[in-house]
Amino acid sequence: MRRKLRVWWRHLWLDQGDARRALGGSAGLDELTRAVQRCEARHAAQVRLCVEASLPWRYLWRGDAPGVRARSMFAKLGVWDTEANNGVLIYALLADRALEIVADRGVHARVMAGEWDAALSQARQAITAGGGLTQGLIAALEHIATTLEPLYPVLPGGDASNNELPDPPELG
């Protein structure tokens, strides 16, 4: 019971402003937007970032893990709705210090699960090395770009993508 109260307390006190501050404010958000654009320029897949400070109460009440919310945000943000089923969501939950990657079925069928674990590991290493959440997300984006380049190549003379998803991070 004590553990549950501590978890709820963390979620109660964090809000969207905390997510913005954790990313370094407007400068950090701009840096992440450019990092998503650089990532998508290397392949024809779509990538989206979502950073939430805390879970909505209904998720806490049910005791849902951050992965449940990540999959929900994957749907809510329309990452599943790309023409080639090639969307990838990187989800961060500050209150639980959780990072998740959710990939659409087209990507999931072509990428081994270990690649997502490696991307998250690089993100965590960057965060613990003092780079903060912004640098951690950039490290994950770099790994994802390297993973997706051979699977979703940019066609010669073509655009890297038609940018079906917004580049700025979604904050919650």
Image (cartoon, grey):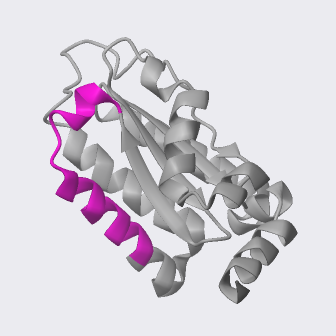
- Determine whether 123 is above or below 153 in the image: below
Where on the picture, by quarter, is residue 107?
top left
| Secondary structure, magenta segment, majority class | helix
Quadrant of res 150: top left
At horizontal 30% and vertical 25% (from top left) the residue drawn is 44
Q: Is residue 157 left or right of residue 161?
A: left
Residue that appears at 63% across and 43% down = 169
Q: Which residues are drawn in magenta?
A: 104-124
69 sits to left or right of 144: right
The answer to whether residue 52 of the structure is visible from this angle is no
Q: Is residue 132 visible?
A: yes
At horizontal 39% and vertical 78% (from top left) the residue drawn is: 125
Q: Is residue 111 magenta?
A: yes
Q: Is residue 67 above or below residue 88?
A: below
**Among all residues in the image, which is located at the extreme front?**
1
Residue 55 falls in image quadrant: bottom right
The percent coordinates of residue 161 (x first, y second) are: 38, 20
